[in-house]
């Protein structure tokens, strides 16, 4: 009977998705396109748990809706039960909750925040970078702190442009990715272009339509950065312990 060689076989990626569904599809497409495979057998094993019933993240943070943590715990448990070894979540705002969820779990967690900031640093952007994100993500300062730790300053849209961004995100979630939505994204980027030469599209709904957006400033796509980081980690050999067994990272805090 043919047996896989555990020393060379890639690790299995678990995607905790559904936040929203279109963003999850977009991420998986980028994961496949980022994998250097010429045939089916050279691609990665992927387990997808897409749960669009996860409560609204913004309402939860405002105290007007339920805490999504139990839904996230359930999703991670399903992925672990199916053999996932690496966890990725293609939603920026939900990362506010994930450090607690992945703690002490036997899975390597790759943060979309860290992946995006690494991509910005690798792109050698200026000392300041635009940040397009939900109100909740901005309020959490997840990106601002991560950027500051790497010597970068986040430049936020004006209140008027932030309101427009909120509408764009709602439109994409409702399935509207048409010309007006794309033009609105261009308007925000054009306004930012007066002060920065690059911006992070730190909402996966924006990532969905980036392929249709032309801009004078460079756009860092966290979904694409996360996909590339996931492929890299899945294909990387694990270190061995003194007995020759592969070591697994237990949570995301050990992988930064």
Image (spheres, rainbow, N blue to C red):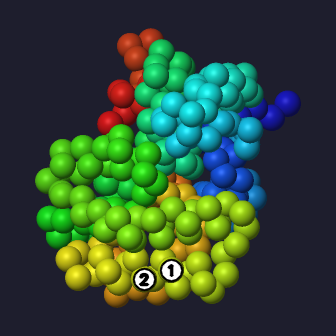
Q: Residues within 10 Å of mark 2 (few under 14, many from 20)?
A: some
For residue 72, above or below residue 113:
above
Q: Quadrant of the N terminus?
A: top right
User: Is the residue 6 above or below the residue 112 in the image?
Assistant: above
Q: Dot 1 corresponds to which residue?
A: 184
Q: Nearer the viewer, residue 194 or 211?
A: 194
> Does the rendering let one see residue 153?
yes
Residue farthest to the top, as pictured: 243
Q: Residue at x 69, y 46 (%)?
A: 18
Q: Secondary structure at mark 1?
A: helix
Tag of residue 187: 2
Left or right position of 249 against 129 = right
Say left or right for 119 vs 41: left
Q: Secondary structure at mark 2?
A: helix
Q: Residues within 10 Å of mark 1 (few under 14, many from 20)?
A: some
Looking at the image, which is closer to me, 148 or 247? 148
Is residue 80 visible to the viewer in this orientation of the structure? no
* Res 240 label: none
In front here: 125 or 97?
97
Mark 1–mark 2 CB contact (< 8 Å)? yes
């Amino acid at each position: 009977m043919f047996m896989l060689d555990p020393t060379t076989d890639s690790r299995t990626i678990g995607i905790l998705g559904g936040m929203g569904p279109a963003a999850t599809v977009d991420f998986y497409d980028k994961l496949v396109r980022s994998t250097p495979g010429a045939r089916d057998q050279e691609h990665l094993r992927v387990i997808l748990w897409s749960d669009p019933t996860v409560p609204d993240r913004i309402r939860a943070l405002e105290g007007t809706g339920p805490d999504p943590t139990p839904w996230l715990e359930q999703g991670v448990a399903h992925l672990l039960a199916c053999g996932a070894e690496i966890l990725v979540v293609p939603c920026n705002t939900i990362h506010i909750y994930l450090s607690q969820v992945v703690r002490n779990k036997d899975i390597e967690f790759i943060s979309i925040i860290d992946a995006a900031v690494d991509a910005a640093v690798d792109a050698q952007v200026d000392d300041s970078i635009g940040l397009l994100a939900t109100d909740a993500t901005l309020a959490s300062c997840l990106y601002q702190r991560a950027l500051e730790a790497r010597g970068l300053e986040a430049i936020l849209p004006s209140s008027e442009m932030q309101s427009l961004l909120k509408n764009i995100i709602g439109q994409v979630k409702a399935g509207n990715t048409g010309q007006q939505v794309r033009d609105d994204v261009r308007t925000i980027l054009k306004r930012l272009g007066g002060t920065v030469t690059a911006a992070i599209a730190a909402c996966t709904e924006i990532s969905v339509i980036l392929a249709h957006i032309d801009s004078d400033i460079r756009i860092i796509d966290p979904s694409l950065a996360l996909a590339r980081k996931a492929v890299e980690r899945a294909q990387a050999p694990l270190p061995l312990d003194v007995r020759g067994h592969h070591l697994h990272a237990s949570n995301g805090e050990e992988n930064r």
